[in-house]
Image: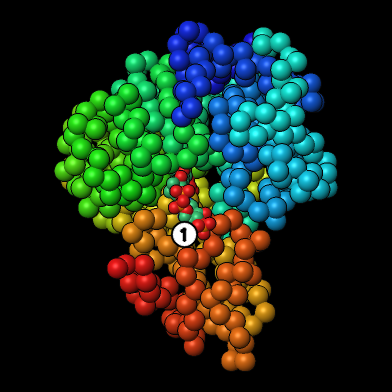
Amino acid sequence: MSNHLFDAIRRAARVDAVFIETAEGRVLTYGEMLDQSGRIASALHALGVRPGDRVAVQVEKSPEALMLYLACVRAGAVYLPLNPAYTLTEVDYFIGDAEPRLVVCQPKTLEGVTTVATRHDARVETLDESGGGSLMDLAREEEPEFPDAERGADDLAAILYTSGTTGRSKGAMLTHNNLLSNASTLCDYWQFSASDRLIHALPIFHTHGLFVASNVVLLSGASMFFLPKFDANEVLRLMPSSTVMMGVPTFYVRLTQQEALTREAAANMRLFVSGSAPLLAETHRAFQRMTGLAILERYGMTETNMNTSNPYDGERIAGTVGHPLPGVSLRIADPETGNPLLDGETGMIEVKGPNVFKGYWRMPEKTQTEFRADGFFVTGDLGKIDDRGYVHIVGRGKDLVISGGYNIYPKEVEAEIDQLAGVIESAVIGVPHPDFGEGVTAVVVKRADSTLDERSILDGLADRLARYKQPKRVIFVEDLPRNTMGKVQKNRLRELCADLYSG
Ligand code: MCA
Ligand code: AMP
């Protein structure tokens, strides 16, 4: 039997080597990783999970949660991670759309999730942040040996939901080879080896923390400090015994606010990687001034995994995302016609390669509109390539806010605000924010007789949207500025609110 992704992970695993160390000093070796993921895979099988079945997982970060991902790969299931911050309303949509065989949730959300899952014929088991719960009780009864399910390069390994500009979230279907080829490329490009130790402070329900960080460690047989969440002091404490960190720009903003961030503190570190959102050149420079190290910025997307990276050896240029990775074709095209543009011209970034996803789950038409006839995927990011071949992201052709590395689609927030009594219409924008990069901001037009205020709008959204999607501020205006076509001029609103979070 061959399992495209797990066979490669297994080949890199030296059973006695450390894979994970937690903040409390708990150590998990590669041998234990193989045993534990095998037991969980057996439990999944006993629960009726078969190759191709979806397994939806909404749990806090823990080593066991990562083992569950690996168990799904081994059982041939399609792993579907969900942010624990999602409300039940949001979870209901994902379960209804993906139709998982099994949902794994936290014991504290069992009641609500069971109501939703039962409606969609899914079974529910639990996993808590300390590795307990009904799924683990079942796994403990199982043998560690599990015959990995036969899975080829093109079979699905995961579905990750990404919000759509027109409302409905889309499930990006990622194959075994999407994940394996991209992680292998990154291992080489960033020169990972078994002697590396990564500081893993990212969540594990998105591409960055799940595939980029964890798969790269697994495929190089390296180890990682596995932190429940980012904490600048904790990261500084671990730096002397680590070699690499991956983070979103907010991690680096927060680190540069620490006096303890010095050359000595970072002396053992060989690489800091940033991605998921633009890293300000001033953060890049401040970090380099304090540590002597240039952050390596790269660019990716849920649908494409990683597309570009600044060089490992060579100049890492602030404000650029570097060169296309080996095997990735990247071009800049006219957003309307799709015709390729010349270097230096700004247009739509389009990519093609083994990293690019298979399509959106059960949305063939949507999938078709996002690809050009020659197979290039239209990213929705606007960029240019300079005369040294470095890619610059200069804007977004899609209406999207990125806050602390999380994506928020204004349409989704606007729809929730608009259905509150007293609201006539709203526009949601991203405004420069010193910590999160962009702060979600709502501009609202209310009825003349309405008593709505900022607090009542926020209260009205509390149970409907995950916390990070909720506006940090709500501003009221008489009416929204529109162009002659009737389209809301969000750039004018961004100017109006430009200083909302500064000072
Ligand atoms: C937490 N809050 C946020 C965010 N995170 N609000 C807006 N944006 C956020 N990102 C809320 C909290 O609920 C809290 O609300 C308040 O803001 C302050 O929380 P704080 O303690 O400061 O936040 P934190 O827990 O320290 O989290 C900030 C964080 C975290 C560490 C930046 O958001 C994070 O780990 N982000 C990484 C996201 C990520 O992995 N993205 C990769 C996507 P209140 O106080 O009101 O309750 S993958 C991707 O984009 C592609 C593929 C790629 O290229 O990588
Ligand atoms: P996601 O949908 O979470 O996969 O987010 C992908 C989006 O994040 C991309 O389409 C970009 O807009 C943005 N992104 C990721 N990395 C970078 C980066 N280094 N610089 C600017 N934007 C980025």
Residue lying at 75% horizontally and 29% vertically, measured from the top left = 134
Badge 1 local density, few (<14 within 10 Å), some, or many (20+)?
some
Task: Please identify the quadrant where the N terminus is shown.
Answer: top right
Residue 71 at least partly seen: yes
Tell me: 380 left or right of 463: left
Left or right for 172, reference 52: left
Residue 367 higher or lower than 212, as above or below = below
Number of numbered discs visible in the structure rendering: 1
Quadrant hosting residue 401: bottom left
Name the element at disc 1: loop
The quarter holding residue 133 reads top right
Q: Quadrant of the C terminus?
A: bottom left
The one of 73 and 145 positioned closer to us in this rendering:
145
Furthest-bottom residue in view?
449
Front residue (pair 466, 262): 262
Residue designated by label 1: 400
- At 55% from the left and 36% from the top, the residue drawn is 61
Up/down of 220 relative to 399, above or below: above
**Residue 395's quadrant in the figure?**
bottom left
> Where is residue 149 shown, x and y percent of the image?
67, 17
Q: Amino acid at mark 1?
A: Leu
Instruction: Residue at 38%, 36% (x, y): give it.
Output: 234
Residue 499 spot, x, y in % from top left = 33, 72
Label 1 residue near ligand 2, CB within 8 Å: yes
